[in-house]
Image (cartoon, helix red, strand yellow):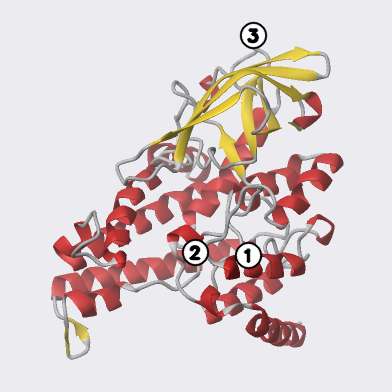
Amino acid sequence: MAADLNAFRAEIRDWLEDACPPTMRTPMVADETPGGGRRASFKNPETKVWMERMAERGFTVPTWPKQYGGAGLDRDEARVLQEELRRLNARPPLVGMGISMIGPALLEFGNDEQKAEHLPKIARGEIWWCQGYSEPNAGSDLASLRTSAVEDGDDYIINGQKIWTSGADNADWMFCLVRTDPKAPKHEGITFILFDMTTPGVSVRPIRLISGLSPFCETFFENVRVPKKNVVSEPGKGWTVAKRLLQYERTSIGGIGGGQRTTTLEELAADYVGLEAGRIADPTLRADVVRHRMNDRAFALTVRRNQEESSAGVAPGAVSSMFKYYGTEQNKGRFELMLRITGTRGVGWAEGGFTAEELDITRGWLRSKANSIEGGTSEVQLNILAKRVLGLPD
């Protein structure tokens, strides 16, 4: 097996050296994120080239079956691929809810027609997805959602509102929770359904954030007609699908930062604080950076151990809440350290006197505050861990 992996590594390394464009080996630029979709535009042409080359090999979703656009790699092969991508400092070829959330959920719950229709398009970056979960009165208590879906022949007629729908203004399709049985207990009357965002009656309004960006939106449905064949699993069984998808989401959020190299805390400190005998000059800051690095390493090893202990194909369980919570705290802590290191240089807002990296730090620091809310609040994650991992009583 080791010999096979060594041969696989050599083959992958040679291919990546040829296939990965030069600019795709540099730190990710915010407006070059490879999301794909029907309306995708590529500021850097090599972003599209890299996505298409990786998709052709199935490497945008390496562990998915080949019939659905993946490469069919096993766990060890996928790890080798990730190691070789990190060696090149390669940018991710494709990101988004398609590959991290709805794709895995469809692999588990979708029927053959739904898998064949949607998964290859996700793998090729042809469709950009958004999530229709939260509502103005249904956030952490998601099962209180009110968006209704009423049967009408072979369709459902959907009316209601969603909020914090990330990227809805650019999305092609939405996976959505709707209430199909208002008389059933709240967890049992929910259905998981898919629909095209160009369907008549769907409207989107971006929400402007303190960071100056608008990644979140309000989404409104007015008599939106959606075929019943777009229901994933069964009517009334949407809560089961929704919970599993949240586990996939929380696992992906737990990996905030990804594997690509960016400016390290040590490099920032060398520029803004200075070094003494090759070490960060401020001893208190130095100790905090070391502690953060140790926690990062321990977290990465814990995630890897969990992956290696799980048998192939097993979906993430409640432990995903641990990864989401700890990954959130690590990411927030990293930006707090960056702000300490850069001082007033890290709170710039407009061009003129501040570098692009300094302005990115400001916005990244503000954006990191949402990590403890999105994908389930940190309080919710701690409750899940208390009940389902530690077995504590209610």
Local secondary structure at mark 3? loop
Q: Residue at x 15, y 71 (%)?
A: 284
Q: CA distance from mark 3 to mark 2?
A: 43 Å
- Residue 60 position within the rendered picture, expressed as x and y whole percent measured from the top left: 67, 63
The answer to whether residue 75 of the structure is visible from this angle is no
Please tell me the numbered disc located at residue 48: 1
- Residue 23 position within the rendered picture, expressed as x and y whole percent measured from the top left: 52, 76
Could you say which is closer to the camera, residue 124 or residue 299? 124
Local secondary structure at mark 1? helix
Q: On the image, numbered disc 3 is attached to which residue?
A: 183
Q: Residue at x 67, y 13 (%)?
A: 181
Please tell me the numbered disc located at residue 143: none
Task: Please identify, in this view, whether the residue under mark 3 or under mark 2 is nearer the observer.
Answer: 2
Q: Residue at x 26, y 67 (%)?
A: 355
**In the rendered structure, which amino acid carries the disc numbered 2?**
Gly
49 versus 68 height, above or below? below
Q: CA distance from mark 1 to mark 3?
A: 48 Å
Task: Please identify, in this view, whether the residue under mark 2 or under mark 1 is nearer the observer.
Answer: 1
Name the image quarter holding residue 337.
Answer: bottom left
Position of the C terminus by quadrant = top left
